[in-house]
Amino acid sequence: MKPARYGAIEAGGTKILCGVTGEDGRWLARDKFSTAEPEQNLAELIGFFSQHPVNSLGLASFGPLDIDPTSLHYGRLLNTSKPHWSQFPFARRLADALNTDVVATTDVLAAAMAEQRFGAARGCDNFCYVTVGTGIGVGTFIAGKPLTGKHHPEPGHLPLIRNTQDNVASACPYHSHCAEGLASGPALSRRVPVPLTELAATAPLWELAADYLAQLCHSLMLCYQPDRIILGGGVMRAPHLLPMITNAFESQARNYAQSLTEQNLLVSALKNEAGLLGALALVHPLENVHVYT
């Protein structure tokens, strides 16, 4: 009998990661593709997993995504801001092409699962994981379980109060002043002439970003009272941003909500690995998976 193989896909707004492990949790193969049109990415993924067959496959995708396993459209993208991906039956197409079971969830819920198992939410049953990258997504765990309804919640599209000096159009095609439209990577990048990675820590944009992200954290705190809020994604690689968010939160909350401190407002411990590890967690017990950080 051949040893079991487990596959994982993290489909994000700018890149798609995939990998295969054995029963011992060691990565046997990994690859990365730029997120393009669905048929192109599907062909790339089928090519990878045809070379590295798996017994089951975990899919963590940007959303909105149908994550109801009883739904006829389980694993299908809903109306999304990513061009050409709306209504794409992602999980079904993979399952049919690879003749394997596919378990699907959103990229942010998968990342939250991984943080709970390996990272900044270890030992914590009530927390929110916020990814701030190409988009903004939130995965919330209450009493150790992911919070979902008919579909997964979308706090990344909660409306924010615009700074009166901020007249740049929203980066979200659906909302004029949601968190994703004002504070995601593309939203911030359109406000400055250089890449965010080259922007000085003293640039005014960071104060604006901190204000918007603190508003989102304030809403999460009021709604869920999490023990921790964990921030991940490319924008949070700026080391000066976290304390700025903490300060902005305190100014907005005015001692009404629970305070955010260095103990309960944290940056992701898994860096770029959270989503792929979370996808793997959908199909693998993950006792011995090697964590690259």
Image (cartoon, rainbow, N blue to C red):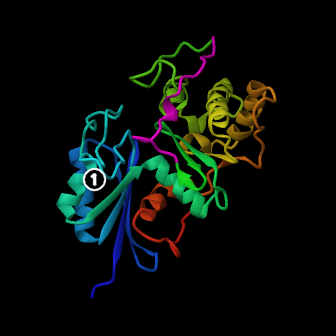
Q: Can see residue 94?
A: yes
Q: Main secondary structure of the magenta part?
A: loop
Q: Among all residues in the image, which is located at the extreme right?
A: 255
Queried whether the magenta region covers residue 27, the answer comes back as no
Q: Residue at x 46, y 64 (%)?
A: 281
For residue 220, side relative to residue 11 (left or right): right
Location of residue 111 in the rendering, given as x and y in whole percent from the top left corner: 51, 53
Location of residue 245 in the rendering, given as x and y in whole percent from the top left corner: 70, 34
For residue 186, side relative to residue 237 (left or right): left
Residue nearest the observer in this picture, 195 or 116: 116
Identify the image quadrant of residue 100.
Answer: bottom left
Q: Quadrant of the N terminus?
A: bottom left
Q: Residue at x 63, y 39 (%)?
A: 224
Residue range (magenta): 147-164
Q: Quadrant of the C terminus?
A: bottom right
At numbered mark 1, what does the secondary structure look like: helix, strand or loop?
A: helix
Identify the image quadrant of residue 233.
Answer: top right
Q: Can see residue 43?
A: no
113 vs 181: above or below: below
26 vs 129: above or below: below
Dot 1, crowdedness within 10 Å: few (<14), some or many (≥20)? many
Q: Residue at x 47, y 71 (%)?
A: 285
Residue nearest the observer in this picture, 282 or 261: 282
For residue 277, side relative to residue 51 (left or right): right
Instruction: Tell me which amino acid carries mark 1.
Output: Ala
Residue nearest the observer in this picture, 242 or 61: 61
Location of residue 53 in the rendering, given as x and y in whole percent from the top left corner: 26, 71
How many numbered discs sit on the rendered protein? 1
User: Would you name the residue on which mark 1 appears?
Assistant: 91
Queried whether the magenta region covers residue 152, the answer comes back as yes
Location of residue 154 in the rendering, given as x and y in whole percent from the top left corner: 47, 35
